[in-house]
Amino acid sequence: MTDDPYAPISDIYDFSYEDFDDDVDFYDNLARSVDGAVLELGVGTGRVALPLARRGHEVVGIDTSASMLDVAQAQLKTMRLRKGSLLLLDADMTNFDLNRKFGLVFAAANTFQHMLTTREQLICLQRVAAHVAPGGVFAMSIRSPVSVDWDEGGVPAPLLLDWVRDEPATGARVMKLVAAQAEPERMVRRMTYVYDRVFPDGTVRRSVFVTDLRYSTEAEIRLLLQQVGLRVTHVYGDYDLSPVGQGDNLVFVARAEGSR
């Protein structure tokens, strides 16, 4: 047994999200607006970090999933990047200390939602604030709580088909199914992802990933960022800079206090 919850899906994660790169330009533009290196929290397989390194940024990525870091490292070895362009580290986003500061620190997609209590959120943001250079920026995206039907709390969640695709690398037909169980008293959704691979010889392989995601309001996140000395400059509804309410996300951009 492994205590790495991503281990069952690390080899299919990039295939599952290969059509999602909406946020790469967003973080690239932020990185170009500041001086210094970039730090990604929850770097995973390098979905965002690798393209940023390819575009010339010096990137450090931290994660606690050994299996996801292994995938990122394997991809890094196949790329012709300047030495030191991307450093991958096994570290927890609630207690890391890298002994350096960064121009941009970010948590992509729903990474910050793995902080399931206000205390965990605050501790994480305190570590973030300690690593943002003067004039630097912290950015993150979370799903807006208004995108969830919380009235379904306590009702058994159906497992629904999300998509069916062919996996070129293996020739398998892949089916992704998702169940979302709402817990409104905690503002948490338990997400269950099931990947069924049907290989050309008829064998079937099932991979299951279960995770809890905490939902927070804009006001809650603003207050937490203020408490750690990060001033919110923008909140968007999506990576295209649309206003809040015109997307399912809350995308925060905050700057270290005392900066421009």
Image: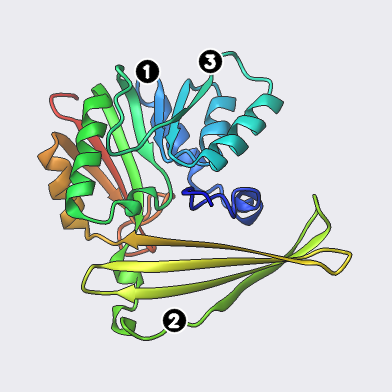
Is residue 240 found left or right of 55 in the rendered image? left
Structural distance between the alpha carbons of marks 1 and 2: 45 Å
- Residue 184 as seen in the image, left or right of residue 92: left
**Residue sitting at x 48%, y 20%:** 58
- Say what secondary structure mark 3 lies in: loop
Residue underneath mark 2: 157
Task: Give, as a three-letter code, the residue at label 1.
Answer: Gly
Question: Residue visible at 15% across and 46% down?
Answer: 224
Q: Earlier in the sequence, mark 2 or mark 3?
A: 3
- Type of amino acid under label 3: Gly
Q: Position of residue 199 (x, y in %)?
A: 82, 63
Is 185 in front, or is 104? 185
> Is mark 2 in CB contact (under 8 Å) with mark 3?
no
- Name the residue located 26 percent from the left edge and 33 percent from the top edge: 128
Q: Which residue is mark 1?
A: 36
Q: Is residue 117 above or below residue 147?
A: above
Locate residue 119, reporting x and y percent.
17, 49
Total count of labels:
3
**Real-space Cα separation, disc 1 to disc 3, in angstroms:** 14 Å
* Disc 3 target residue: 84
Name which residue type carries label 2.
Ala
Going from the N terminus, do you reach mark 1 or mark 3 first? 1
* 1 and 3 marks in contact (CB < 8 Å): no
Can I make out residue 47 in this image? no
Closest to the observer: 33 or 161? 161
In which image quadrant can residue 208 be found?
Answer: bottom right
Q: Residues within 10 Å of mark 1 (few under 14, many from 20)?
A: some
Q: Residue furthest top?
A: 83
Left or right of 61? Residue 207 is right
Residue 15 seen in render: yes
Quadrant including the C terminus: top left
**Vertically, is 160 above or below 235?**
below
